Image: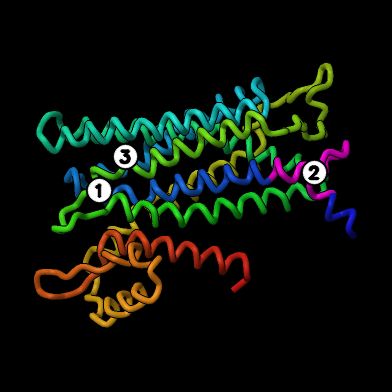
Amino acid sequence: MMTNKKSLFVTPDGQRVLFTFILVSSLFLLWGFCNGLIDVMDKHFQDELGLTKAQSAWVQFAHYLGYCLMAIPAGWLAGKLGYKGGIIAGLLIVAAGGLWFVPATSISQMVRSGGVSPALGFVAFLVGVFVIATGLTFLETIANPYTTVLGDPRYAATRINLAQSCNGVGWPLGPIVGSIYFYSTDAAGRSTGSETLYIPYAGIAGIVIVLAVVFAFAPMPDVKAEDHFHEDAEGGGATRSIWSHPHFAMAVAAQFFYVAAQAGIFSFFINYMTADVPAIPASWEAAAASLASHAGFLENWLSGWFVTGAQGAIAMSNKGASNLASVAFLCFLIGRFTGA
């Protein structure tokens, strides 16, 4: 029994790759966090730039356009660069996209001063979103299959499920951090989100640069999956297009509609929670304040969850809806993995 457990992270040729697996799994947390940030950005642009819901959805369009355009090229380049080279390339692209948010924020400030048009400021942020998505495409294209070969083939599904659980941890953290910087206010209650939006992305850039250095020196065996269909043999290769397989074509269609539904729900959750909702009892705000006072680390996160309207009714704020989305997603994950 002990031998089976060890073989989970021991390759057929005897290499122990637990550290490599942990390192690769950190990438799942990274892109889960980045996706979570994207999900709470729409309402920010609606408020700051006066965009409609349809116009703010360009954020998601730019994000998934990066995946769509880069998926096949990333797979081809990964084959040329290898696992390590492909991951490092993806991390550097993510870093470039994160750093771009610094000048994009400056452009946004020029919009507020009347120096440039609001459309240009919005497009500047979309460029950053697109570049980060292209880098994440590299990482996902490589990390998913790589986890399956880091050990005994019998436990390939176990390893990728373990790695994917890190994605589930990173995803709800994104809205929490986004709520702090996208919906921040000053002492007078004025929104400062347009001034601090770059901070989490600059932080991501710093982290992924460090990760790129770590990956450059880390041991990463270039393990290949077994060639069951003799694709590498002389005269081998697919004789039919992959799209001729009905189960593949239908799986792609199912994934397309699934991601479309997921992106739509996550993107406009804040709009749903803050539009035409019943007033929230004042006791809820008092309970939140009491909880924050007894647990100081929650104070910044809970502050601003509720706002008082002109008629004195207390309702969910943008920040509160963003954090609630994180809590709801986390509860979903707990239920999924515990069978609750």
Q: Is residue 142 left or right of residue 60?
A: right
Point out the stretch of residues depicted in magenta: 7-21
For image coordinates 83% across by 21% down, the residue present is: 233
Depth order, front residue of 276/93? 93
Q: Which residue is mark 2?
A: 151
Q: Amino acid at mark 1?
A: Gly
Percent x, y of residue 324: 37, 65
Q: Amino acid at mark 2?
A: Gly
Residue 261 in view here:
no
User: In the rendered structure, which disc, 3 or 1, sits on the residue that comes first in sequence?
Assistant: 3
Depth order, front residue of 332/296? 296
For image coordinates 83% across by 38% down, the residue present is: 15
Q: Amino acid at mark 3?
A: Trp
Residue 20 part of the magenta-drawn span: yes
Q: Which residue is mark 1?
A: 193
Residue 313 part of the magenta-drawn span: no
Percent x, y of residue 46: 22, 48
Assess disc 2: are there few (<14), some (14-19) or many (≥20) residues with their C-alpha within 10 Å of its C-alpha. many
